[in-house]
Image (cartoon, rainbow, N blue to C red):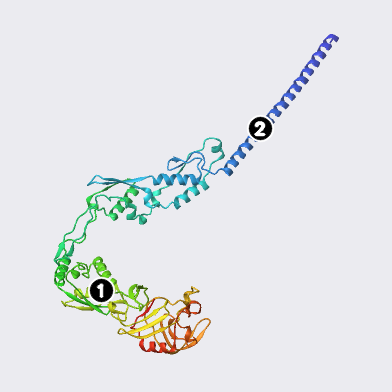
Amino acid sequence: MNKKLKLTIIIISILILVTAIGCLAFVYISDKKEKERLEAERIAYEQQLQREQESYDNFLKDSDSFYPNSFLNNNEISGMTPDEVIEAYKNDFNNEKLTIIVEDTGDEESLSFAALNVNYENFIKYVKNSYKNQEISKEEFLGEASRKDYAYDFINDIDMDAFTEENLSDFFSDNVAMSRDAYVLVDPESGEVTIEPEVFGNEVSFDILKEKVAEALSTRDYTIKVTSDDYVKPVILSDDPLLSERKATLEKVIDKEISIKLCGEKTSLSGKELWSILDGSDDLISDKAYESYISKVKSKYDSCYFNRPFTTSYGDEITLEHGNYGWVIDAGKTKEIIAKAVASSSSKPSVEVAYSRYGQRPALHEFNDTYIEVSISGQHVWAYVNGECLLSDDIISGEITTNDPETTTNRGVFRLSYKQLKAVLRGADYEEPVTYWMPFDGGIGFHDATWRDDSEFGGETYMGNGSHGCVNMRLSSAAVLFDIIDKEIPIIVW
């Protein structure tokens, strides 16, 4: 091989080697750049994932409302807080209405669901629990959230037991004719007894309407039709045998004359006065008419706890305050007594009324001419028996300057509680023996006060040196009063 060929081979080999080295260097450099690019992309992707995770975590942490695409009863609640949902649905539900149609008249009324006593506590719990337990994935948060449907049936929270006639107080109030049972009537002017026929009205039965409301709610058909079959019907009809029996009984009663002893006096119940209180009830007495009758009787004969006129020993006309003396008629028990007399076989029964407080003397003559009189302003006592004044003397009554109820001699008409010889009167700051003790108003009474100087009685002693509430008397006057006084004699303090 010549030198020229060898040189060519060497040159070519060198060129091939250089080319190979260049290629290797290019590949190395390119691969490095690719790796750097891929690493940058990886870092950017991880950072994006981190940002998305942080955004999702912050959303879950900070969200105070329902997640996107949330619906309650097909109404969107996305972005609403639980309180906003509760308030909105309460208002919406309360605005729902039942329509009530009266077929006979064509009248149409509306009943708001607000009148149906809905208990919202269960609904509130449901909304809050739904909010608390709602879920949304990161993918839904980043993309489009799937629809979340919540459903709640308010009908289950209606308290039909609390649904009362007051809920319908404004319904059917115009042109309503009330149904009425047949009844026995006594004409208070003539005493004629008749059977008044029943009346069929158009008053809607609440019980039936309530059943229809419950059915409408359960079927979701909010239109209710009311027919004449739903009206209140009379229960007692004119052909009821009981009415005929009571009519016959009352026809025997109208000629009765009932003699009545009351409060030590006598009166009678017959004629128009008797007829006015009769009816066909179980005891043949009309409650309303009896109340009117007994009210008049009590206003005339009740004396205890009522103020009454009086002429003082000084000749002044005054009104006495009430005390514990006198009569009080028991209206309820007296009705039973009169009813038995009405139903009795006697044509002229005699009865005495019942009392819640029994008096001492005839009500209309309690202190005509026999009574004990005490004047606080005059500081004087009088004792009258059959119109004759057997005692007249000065006294000392309760201390008035302190305005202390414990030392006040109360004004009014009282009765003697009891009387006792040789008693010891005790209080917080005193203990005094007395010869004559005559209490009439709790711990207040007449007694001798021998510790007092004779000159103290009368005048203005009670203004600064009065008693503890009792009526202090001279020993001699207390002895006279002790002999006179008894439980029948009224004690008048004015």
Where residue 44 is drawn, which disc sits there?
2
- For the N terminus, the quadrant is top right
Nearest the eye: 89 or 44: 89
The answer to whether residue 2 of the structure is visible from this angle is no
Q: CA distance from mark 1 to mark 2?
A: 102 Å
Residue 139 higher or lower than 383, as above or below:
above
Q: Residues within 10 Å of mark 1 (few under 14, many from 20)?
A: some
Where residue 336 is drawn, which disc sits there?
1
Residue 82 higher or lower than 315, as above or below:
above
The residue shown at (42%, 45%) is: 91
* Amino acid found under the numbered disc labelled 1: Glu
- For the C terminus, the quadrant is bottom left
SS of the residue under disc 2: helix
Nearest the eye: 136 or 339: 339
The answer to whether residue 79 of the structure is visible from this angle is yes
* Amino acid found under the numbered disc labelled 2: Ala
**In the displayed structure image, the side of residue 28 where residue 352 appears, left or right:** left
